[in-house]
Amino acid sequence: MTQFRKYLPPLIILAVFETVAVTLWLTKDNIFYLYNFSYIGASIALGIFLFIKKYRYARRIVQLLVGLYMLVYLGIICRENMQIEGFWYYLFTGVFEAATIHYAVAKIFGPLVFGRGWCGYACWTAMVLDFLPYKTPAGPRRKMGWIRYVTFAASLIFVAALFLAGAKDMERIMFLAFIFGNIAYYAAGTALAFAFKDNRAFCKYICPVTVFLKPMSYYSLFRVKCDKSKCISCGKCSRVCPMDVDVTDDSRKRKNGTECILCMECVRNCPVKAL
Ligand code: SF4
Ligand code: SF4
Ligand code: SF4
């Protein structure tokens, strides 16, 4: 029984994604949703399973499986803009498809269950940034989080302006926005990572998606918790955390709590298994 309980998290994730896959397949009468969400759910479940098996690169594997699928297959081959501009675009057209579904599942309602698991296991921007050399931040967090609201507003204004101007061939514009938007994200993310010696600086200060992710993940069902009776206050969890989370504080209001990407580095490194 204990053995089975150990594997509950990947099974729950698989069940959640399969429910979404089948529901969307049947309600939208489109089999794409079945294989799309089944593939993503299976990839994430595989990553969690490998983590339970203590495989060092479990998270990176799932990040590459999902990130490359979304960037190369959905974004470049199928020409779906899954960036935030694509979300606004489909929202304005009133179509509950592609980017709106992606946002609803991964970035708006999903975080109520799996927090910012998207950021740790699936985002194609972080998939590249996590290859850079600064796995843990070299310095303290800067007060630059306000920039995310500027980029968030800019993405909304950009798409609204296209609609107001009656732009022709919006599908093509959205595809180009996806390509150039990603190039800009990778360039800015890499430059910031080297400037601040922090791979995740882009996530902390620039990424507009965090405007959705942070408040929703506050209520996340999945959280890393600390068993105070075991903790020896060695501080190792804080030193290895890429997102500056005070993980020894169990409250939802813990410092940088909504930044946790569930990467499990703290859990892996805790010498007394208190997390
Ligand atoms: S914060 Fe943004 S860029 Fe970073 S992992 Fe999350 S969605 Fe991706
Ligand atoms: S690494 Fe473990 S023992 Fe050390 S402070 Fe964190 S929770 Fe406590
Ligand atoms: S190291 Fe722990 S607290 Fe920090 S982001 Fe990863 S899972 Fe969350």
Image: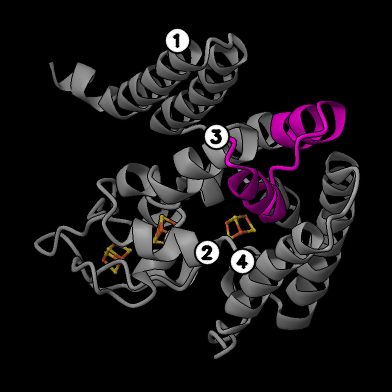
Q: Provide residue 143's location: percent of width, then percent of height.
A: 55, 91
Q: In this view, does 268 lie to the left or right of 192?
A: left
Whether residue 229 is visible here, answered yes or no, is yes
Disc on the earlier residue, 4 or 1:
1
Question: Is ligand 1 within 8 Å of the beta carbon of the residue shown at mark 1?
Answer: no
Q: How far apart are marks 4 and 1 (CA)?
A: 32 Å
In the depicted view, which residue is nearer to us: 194 or 172? Answer: 172
Answer yes or no: do the residues labelled 2 and 4 have beta carbons within 8 Å?
yes
Inter-mark Cα distance, 1 to 3: 14 Å
Type of amino acid at the residue the image marks with label 2: Thr
Q: Is mark 3 within 8 Å of ligand 1?
A: no
Query: In the rendering, which numbered label is found on residue 96?
Result: 3
Residue 61 seen in render: no
Type of amino acid under label 4: Pro
Mark 4 closeness class: few <14, some 14–19, many ≥20 residues within 10 Å: many
**Magenta segment: does it hold 79?**
yes
Q: In this view, does 34 lie to the left or right of 64?
A: left
Residue at 37 percent across and 65 percent down: it is 215
Q: Name the residue under label 1.
A: 26
What residue span does the magenta drawing correspond to?
68-95
> Which of labels 2 and 3 is toward the front?
3
Q: Do the residues labelled 2 and 1 touch (CB within 8 Å)?
A: no
Q: Which mark is residue 208?
A: 4
Q: Which of marks 2 and 3 is nearer the N terminus?
A: 3
